[in-house]
Amino acid sequence: MKSRIVRCPACRGDSVYGPDNPYRPFCSERCKSIDFGDWASERFTVPDPTPPDDIPFGDPKEH
């Protein structure tokens, strides 16, 4: 299997995307740890489509 060069999501540098890079898609353990820390500190989040409890949910004509 041939390795590809991709952009590291953390530092934007070149990263080898293949079995010889255990940190892929990151270029290093440092970049992988920085990304993990951003998720752990909630700097990165996944949007939640659920409305807050004080906003009616569903068809407004039914309320």
Image (cartoon, grey):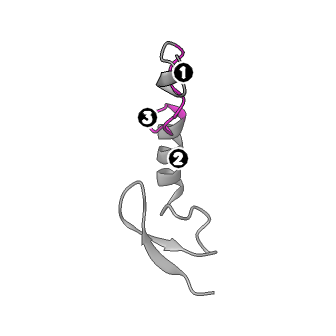
Instruction: Tell me the number on the disc at residue 41.
Output: none
Tell me the quarter of the picture where residue 12 sits.
Answer: bottom left
Residue 6, x across and y down, in percent: 44, 72
Label 2: few (<14), some or many (≥20) within 10 Å? some
Say if the magenta span includes residue 32: no
2 or 51: nearer the eye? 51
Label 3: few (<14), some or many (≥20) within 10 Å? few
Mark closer to the chain start, 3 or 2:
2
Q: CA distance from mark 3 to mark 2?
A: 14 Å
Marks 1 and 3: which is nearer the front? Answer: 1
Specify the principal SS of the magenta part: loop
- For residue 10, above or below residue 38: below
Check disc 3 and report the residue beneath it: 43
Residue 11, x across and y down, in percent: 37, 56
Q: Which residues are magenta?
A: 40-53
Q: CA distance from mark 2 to mark 1?
A: 48 Å
SS class, disc 2: helix
Check disc 1 and report the residue beneath it: 62
Mark closer to the chain start, 1 or 3:
3
Instruction: Tell me the number on the disc at residue 33.
Output: 2
Marks 3 and 2: which is nearer the front? Answer: 3
Q: Give the residue drawn at x 54%, y 24%.
A: 57
- Is 32 positioned to the left or the right of 14 in the image? right
Label 1: few (<14), some or many (≥20) within 10 Å? few
Residue type of the residue flagged with mark 1: Glu
Residue 41, x across and y down, in percent: 49, 31
